[in-house]
Image (cartoon, grey):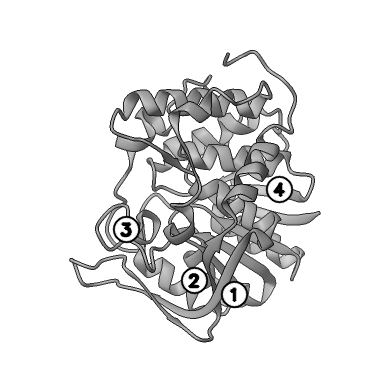
Amino acid sequence: MTKVIIDTDPGTDDAMALMMALQSPDLEVMGLTTVGGNATLAHTTRNALRVLEYLDRTEVPVHAGASRPLKGGFQYAYYFHGSGGLTARMPRPSLKPRAASAVDFLLEATRSEPGEVVLIALGPLTNVAKALLEEPRLEERLREIFVMGSAVGVPGNVTPHAEFNFYNDPRAANIVLSSGVPATLVGLDVCDQVFLEADDVGRFGDSRAESLAARMLKNWFRAQPNGDRYNLCDPLTILAAVQPDLLTYNAAEVSVKESDSEFLGKTEASFGGGRVRVAVAVDVADAMAEFRSMLASGGESSVFR
């Protein structure tokens, strides 16, 4: 099993990605670190705790991280993920986040398990950048990082040029992608190809994860009457960590615009060699089949039916 820490800002697609990872026989989830992004830090942390309780994975620790990017403030996405950051009602969690911060947890976990930990980052990269700034040797201790972020050859999803996570903290993205940590970038170039339509939701099964995912997606499609598809960005990043051969990659040097207001968060990739593997294609049929399989692997539930 691969030891992973998941840095996340749940978020509906984060919630599905977390359920996939927590049920995967290939991943040992050492802990979750939360960051603001899709919602406030208070909401993303609470949502992470809710998912853990729902799957009865209360042994997995949650460490709260950054409530603000390195510069400015987060642009939240309640318009997309619903009030509170999830489109399905869930009980208030009895779990609490651990006392140690996200940065402290990242540094301690990689110090005690050098070269063994894979980081999967599903939100703005603020926590990871802060950890690298505090301890540059983190780049030697992390085995690899999978990053959901970027729009290289396709339009952005928050501006015509920028993807949401990189737009929310472009400085952090630059710090992480230039750090020397082996990085795989899963951006909109591939995420936009892996999606669900409203009719697909009725084909979900009765596992606990499928039941919650179906409820969230049904409510999302009701709330977004003009939304004809739901892109599976964070779930695809989990798939990349579990089955990297589902995607095709090109090596590149990658940078993110930090100061130009019109192009803030725009990803620029120079292909032909570099420290970052950029996902440029995906086997859509196999990725969708694996997404459904990973969600279906848990026990059944009638709670959300």
Q: CA distance from mark 1 to mark 2?
A: 7 Å
At x 18%, y 66%, the residue is: 262
Query: What residue do we see at 41% from left, 67% from top?
Result: 172
| Separation (CA) of disc 1 from disc 3 | 25 Å
- In percent of width and height, residue 48 lies at 55, 37
Q: Amino acid at mark 2?
A: Val
Q: Which mark is residue 29?
A: 4
Q: Earlier in the sequence, mark 3 or mark 4?
A: 4
Mark with earlier residue (1, 2): 2
Q: Position of residue 251 (x, y in %)?
A: 54, 79
Residue 108 falls in which quadrant of the image?
bottom right
Mark 1 and mark 4: Cα distance apart in space: 20 Å
Identify which amino acid the numbered label 4 is placed on. Val
Residue kind at label 1, given as amino acid type: Val
Residue drawn at (49%, 71%) of the image: 176
Label 2 sits on a secondary structure element that is helix
Give the x, y percent position of residue 99: 59, 44
Numbered circle sitting on residue 176: 2
Q: Secondary structure at mark 4?
A: strand
- How crowded pointer 1 is (Cα within 10 Å; few <14, some 14-19, many 20+) is rated as many
Q: CA distance from mark 4 to mark 2?
A: 21 Å
- Which one is earlier in the sequence, the residue at label 1 or at label 4? 4
Q: Return the disc, 4 or 2, that comes first in the chain's sequence.
A: 4
